[in-house]
Amino acid sequence: MRRVQFRRITAALALVAVAGLTGCATREPANAPAPSSGAATGFPVEVSVPGGTTGLKLEKRPERIISLNPSSTETLYAVGAGKQVVAVDDQSTFPAEAPKTTLSGFKPNLEAIANQKPDLVLASNDTDNLVTGLGQLKIQVLLVPAATTLEDTYAQVSAIGKATGHAAEGEALATRMRADIDKIVTDTRKPARPLSYYHELDNSLYSVTSKTFIGQVYGRFGLTNIADEADKSGSGYPQLSAEYLVKANPDLIFLADTKCCGQNARTVAARPGWQSLTAVKNNGVVALDDDIASRWGPRVVDLVRTVSSAVSAAAAK
């Protein structure tokens, strides 16, 4: 249940206005860091993150880093700063070697964080005045909020690389991510007509609209989001009804609740009335990795690749 709540909260932080912009996680180019020089030169540096920290000055390369959000954890390792990471939060599940602890990004414990003797903490939010509290302990905090656009993701990768002494690696990774995503979208076989889709956050039928970060990913492929009209509050994350879904009859269904809630094509087909859906009849139910589908780090390229495969398969029918 906590994983479901975490993914809903993480998703809700990524609301954005419509913008133009998915699950093999084994392909290396987007995630593997460029060769690191290992040098701690280039400091002091000043680092800013879109929507987060502005003008954080780091006098020297941090050697004891704590990450309090999974996307930052993944980015730290992807830019080559993994050896500097001494602790990550309880929601960070990738990579496997990350030193997972009981630290929480939702309810940060200043004493527990300080006990790790960090010289830099990465967090997505200034929860409970985290920045001020750690600042009083002479611990610097880099706020890296939920990305609202793919451009934000690229900027965050670059910023984290710069803050950790891996500026070249961060810039190279951001460039590769952008190039990979653009190429995947360009090379995807396009359907004769626009396809509709439903993205499932959990099995209580919470979804996302086109205004969200994840909605932008689907938007890159020209897909029509069936949840848009149901979002009367404008939150970006409406809870749909089974009746609404059956009536909308999406061409594709993307399940971001395969781990948390055990959902798959079989369980979807077994839902009352769902066996008649186009997505079910045409093998258009796509299982996503929950974590990849809820994070805005380097593995967003894998999410894009999965969506591309689904669109291409549907276009071939």
Image: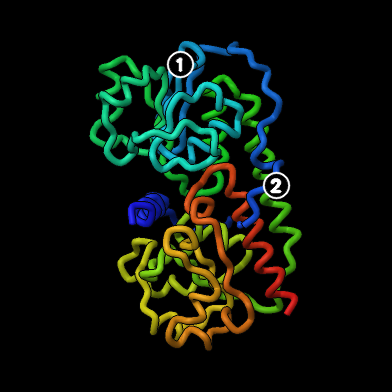
> In front: mark 1 or mark 2?
2
Residue in the image at 39% along x and 50% along y = 10
Q: Secondary structure at mark 1?
A: strand
Please identify the quarter of the rendering in which residue 40 is found: top right
Is residue 303 or residue 54 the one in the foreground?
Answer: 303
Q: CA distance from mark 1 to mark 2?
A: 33 Å
Which label belongs to residue 27? 2
Circle 1 residue: 58
Q: Is residue 69 left or right of residue 1?
A: right
Residue 219 seen anywhere in this rendered image of the structure: yes
Secondary element at tag 2: loop
| Residue 56: x %, y % from top left | 42, 22
User: Looking at the figure, which quarter contains the C terminus?
Assistant: bottom right
Determine which of the numbered discs, if any, sits on residue 25 in the image.
none
Mark with earlier residue (1, 2): 2
Would you say residue 208 is visible in this rendering? no
Q: Quadrant of residue 306?
A: bottom right
**Residue 82 x %, y %:** 55, 27
